[in-house]
Image: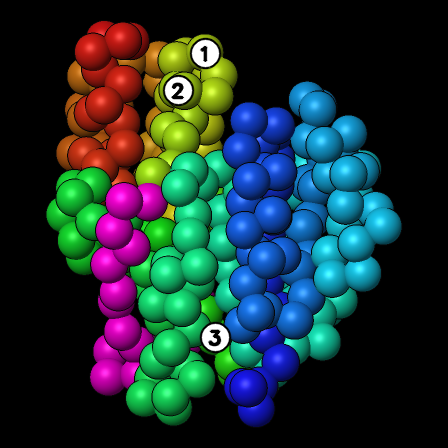
C-alpha cells in the first residue's frame, strides 16, 4: 500500500462523449484515493453525466458556472484536493487504463522524479506532445505555492507548469494505445480552429511573463485570434519578432492545426 495519498484532478468542458469512462477508470484504480472532476461551465450533458457519481464517496464533482479556462479549473481542483500527489488527467481521453495511471504515478511513488509528463505515443513529435500534454503528476507541495498563478494561465497552464521544474526533475513517459479527441471531433472545424488559436495565444502570454514581448507582437497575437485560415496564420506567425514565442507557437500550431487543414483549408 502506498504511503502517499493520490488525488486525480479532471477538468472537463463539454466532454459528454468521454468523461464518464475517464472518471470510472480513475475511480476503479487502487492507486487513487480521490477523484475530483471540475465541470468548467459545460453547456452539453457533462453535468448531467457527472450526476451519476453523486453517491460515490471517492468522486467529488465541482460545477463551475462559467468557463474560466483549464488553469483555473486545475487550481480549483488543487485547492479541494487532499492528496500528497496530484494526477492531472484530461476528460477527453479514450482507452485510459490502470496501466496508464501506474505509468504516470510510478516515478513519484518511487521518488525518482518530481514531475511526470505522459505523452500519447505515436502522436507527432515526442517532445512537443509531451510538453503540451494534460496527463501529468506532481507532488502537491511543489504546486501549492503557485496555485494563484496557475489559476490565471487559462489554456497556457501546461507551458507554465513546465517552467516550474528542472529538466532533471522531469520524466516523460509514453502512454501506449491512449487516445484523445481532437477539438474538430468534438465541435465544428471552424470553432475548433478558433479554440486552437485562443490556446496558442494563451501559451504565448505565459511565455511573455518571462520574456520581453513588444507592443507590435501583442498586436499580432490579437490579430491571430481573428484568423480563419491556416495560410494567414503562418503569415502572422512570421511577423512575431520574439523568437522564443514565435518558435513555441509554430511548434504548437504545426502539431494541432495542420490536421484541420484537410477539413477547413
Tell me whether the residue at label 2 lies in contact with that at label 3, contact meaning CB atoms closer than 8 angstroms.
no
Q: Does the magenta portion include 108?
A: no
Q: Is 74 located above or below residue 1 in the figure?
A: above
To which residue does mark 1 refer?
188
Residue assigned mark 3: 138
Q: Are marks 3 and 1 in contact (CB under 8 Å)?
A: no
How many other residues sit within 10 Å of disc 1, few (<14), some (14-19) or many (≥20)? few
If the image is split into quadrants, where does the N terminus sit? bottom right
- Magenta stretch in the rendered image: 158-178
Coordinates of residue 255 in the picture (x, y in percent): 22, 37
Local secondary structure at mark 2: helix
Q: Which mark is residue 184?
A: 2
Instruction: Please say if the residues under marks 1 and 2 sit with CB atoms less than 8 Å apart.
Output: yes
In space, the residues marked 1 and 2 are separated at their CA atoms by 6 Å
For the residue pair 168 and 198, the one nearer the viewer reads as 168
The quadrant of the image that shows the C terminus is top left
Q: Residues within 10 Å of mark 3 (few under 14, many from 20)?
A: many
Q: Is residue 174 magenta?
A: yes
Closer to us: 251 or 24: 24
Residue drawn at the location 27% of the way across and 18% of the way down: 260
- Specify which label sits upstream in the sequence, 2 or 3: 3
- Is 228 displayed left or right of 88 in the figure? left
For marks 3 and 1 on the same chain, the one whose residue lies earlier in the sequence: 3
Q: Residue at x 24, y 84 (%)?
A: 168
Q: CA distance from mark 2 to mark 3?
A: 30 Å
Amino acid at each position: 500500500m502506498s504511503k502517499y495519498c493520490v488525488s486525480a484532478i479532471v477538468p472537463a468542458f463539454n466532454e459528454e462523449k468521454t468523461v464518464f469512462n475517464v472518471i470510472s477508470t480513475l475511480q476503479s484504480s487502487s492507486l487513487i484515493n480521490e477523484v475530483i472532476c471540475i465541470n468548467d461551465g459545460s453547456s452539453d450533458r457533462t453535468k448531467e453525466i457527472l450526476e451519476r457519481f453523486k453517491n460515490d464517496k471517492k468522486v467529488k464533482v465541482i460545477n463551475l458556472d462559467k468557463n474560466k479556462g483549464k488553469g483555473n479549473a486545475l487550481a480549483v481542483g488543487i485547492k479541494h484536493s487532499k492528496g500528497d500527489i496530484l494526477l492531472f488527467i484530461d476528460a477527453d481521453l479514450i482507452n485510459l487504463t490502470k496501466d496508464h495511471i501506474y505509468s504516470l504515478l510510478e516515478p513519484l511513488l518511487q521518488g525518482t522524479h518530481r514531475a511526470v509528463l505522459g505523452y500519447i505515443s505515436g502522436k507527432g513529435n515526442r517532445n512537443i506532445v509531451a510538453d503540451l500534454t494534460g496527463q501529468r503528476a506532481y507532488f502537491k507541495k511543489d504546486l501549492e505555492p503557485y496555485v494563484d498563478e496557475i489559476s490565471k494561465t487559462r489554456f497556457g497552464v501546461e507551458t507554465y507548469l513546465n517552467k516550474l521544474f528542472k529538466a532533471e526533475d522531469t520524466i516523460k513517459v509514453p502512454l501506449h494505445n491512449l487516445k484523445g479527441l481532437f477539438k474538430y471531433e468534438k465541435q465544428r472545424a471552424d470553432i475548433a480552429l478558433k479554440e486552437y488559436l485562443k490556446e496558442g495565444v494563451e501559451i504565448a502570454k505565459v511565455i511573455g511573463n518571462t520574456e520581453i514581448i513588444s507592443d507590435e507582437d501583442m498586436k499580432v497575437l490579437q490579430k491571430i485570434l481573428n484568423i480563419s485560415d491556416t495560410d494567414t496564420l503562418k503569415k502572422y506567425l512570421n511577423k512575431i519578432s520574439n523568437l522564443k514565442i514565435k518558435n513555441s507557437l509554430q511548434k504548437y500550431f504545426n502539431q494541432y492545426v495542420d490536421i484541420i487543414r484537410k477539413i477547413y483549408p
